[in-house]
Image (cartoon, rainbow, N blue to C red):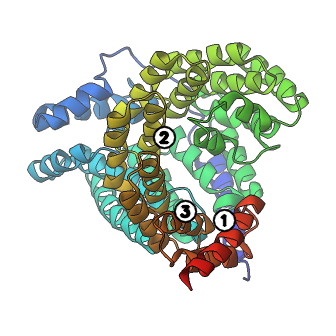
Amino acid sequence: MVKNYFVPAFIILFTIAGIVASIVFASPPVSSRASIPVNLPSQEDLVRKLKAGQYQALDESLARLQARYETGSLSEGRLKKAFSAFERIDPKLDAPLRAWREKFPNSFSSQLAFGLYNQNLAWTARGEAWSAYTNREQFRVMNEYLKAAIKALWKAIDLNPRQPSAWEALVRIAMTTGDQMSLGSVYTQAKKNVPASSILYHSYHYALSPKWGGSKLAQFFLRLELRLRFWDDARFDWVRYHSEYEKIDEYLYDPSPGFVSRILESIGAENLVQTWFAYFPEEKPAILALGLIDSMISRSDSSWLRARRGDALAAVGKYDDALLEHLQAIRMSPNRDRTLLVVASFYHVKRQYAESDKYWRRAIERNPYDPELVVEYSKFLLEIGETQAATEMLERALVFGGHKDDVRREMGRHYWKLKKFDRSLSEFKRAVELVPERPENWFRYANAERHMKNCVASSAYKTYLELCKKWENCKISRRSIARSEIGYIEKGCD
């Protein structure tokens, strides 16, 4: 495949032009202003009003927050936090969001809330697997949600273009769909309407990373522009300390790419701590990270730094201290979903199941139908003997994850443990139908057919072995089992 070098070059030239324009034409650097203390509605209060149908009260509450933001008496971070209340994986929000939008069609808040809700569901539908392991149905469902999100977000911007969360969401959509030209267009318009939004620039900086088709050079020029324009604005500390943030993640996670996702995958493992420690082959990088983190905390503490400090402490074997750091991160930012799960895992390993369950429930409360989350929680419930609760929790995964093969595969494993083999077989078969390219699906399906004494298991095992020639992650033991089973089955089915 020929790479398109024009797009990164275009972005770099565009950014250089922006720097020159900002130096020549921009107003003096914006100083950071502390928000005037206000009584902010909690995310739970906003969601309760939505579910209760109190649309006018909800609309007025959010409009007041927007007005305070525009007059400088409310930070954009607090405004973003309010609207993020609607970024939940909960089907019970769909109908009231539609009703609010229908009754108040000219409310930028109703449009934005609906857009953010659907954008979040789009990423949930897509999942985080590689494209080769993502089926057409996942892409189809994702695009349906994105279509609804984009329409609502642009409507919100038409009604009030000074809403940073709407622009941020459109930047993210352009980034993840790989539309670099659309990304540049959205950014140009956003910059005119929210020229001092740290949230906008932070999301665009991430969109410029090589992972999404940009380049480190384009990111550097953007940071240079921001340093010149906002050199004394505390909201742009992420620009000032970018190299330190990057170095911390390099020290902690580069030895084992995908650390965070694997930590989450390990929840419910027999010994999560050993699994976690295994991701750090050397203590030295973590020790270097600790020194850098402590230096940054002395200047400006944050939940992000505390969570990273917890990871670093775990890497050097100080698990109790690591737990304390993650608890501190939660106190500073109660809705850090990833940290809630890490804490739940720590207590799980310590066999403090009541404490573990408490943090699981906090994570579930915010996203009660997140397929990956409820699957992992169901494993925990099954382990502690709550079989019925585990089954009920797992069934939730079908609401937004029934079209995903990993969800179907986990359903099959669950019912296999409960000795409900017919249901287990049907789930494994569905996983194969959704993503026939994944060897794991065929192995599980073949085992289920073999248990039911069906001769079709032989061809399923053969398909598994054929796929394993293309993928290196097939275990040798499983290949051996497949070959042996083929021989036994073919003898019995002659």
Crowding near the residue tagged with mark 3, few <14, some 14–19, many ≥20 C-alpha atoms within 10 Å: many
Give the quarter of the image for residue 158.
Answer: bottom left
Q: CA distance from mark 2 to mark 1?
A: 32 Å
Q: Nearer the viewer, mark 3 or mark 1?
A: 3
Q: Amino acid at mark 2?
A: Glu
- Residue at horizontal 51 percent and vertical 41 percent from the top: 199
The residue identified by callout 1 is 213
Question: Quick check: 491 above or below 251?
Answer: below
Quadrant of residue 493 in the image?
bottom right
Secondary structure, mark 2, is helix
- Looking at the image, tell me whether mark 2 or mark 1 is earlier in sequence order: 1
The residue to which callout 2 is attached is 376
Quadrant location of the C terminus in the rendered image: bottom right
Which residue is under mark 3? 444
Q: Indicate the amino acid at tag 3.
A: Arg
Which sits in the foreground, 431 or 150? 431
Residue at disc 3, secondary structure: helix
Of the pair 202 and 423, the residue shown nearer to us? 423
Amino acid, disc 1: Gly
Q: Quadrant of the N terminus?
A: bottom right
C-alpha distance separating marks 3 and 1: 36 Å
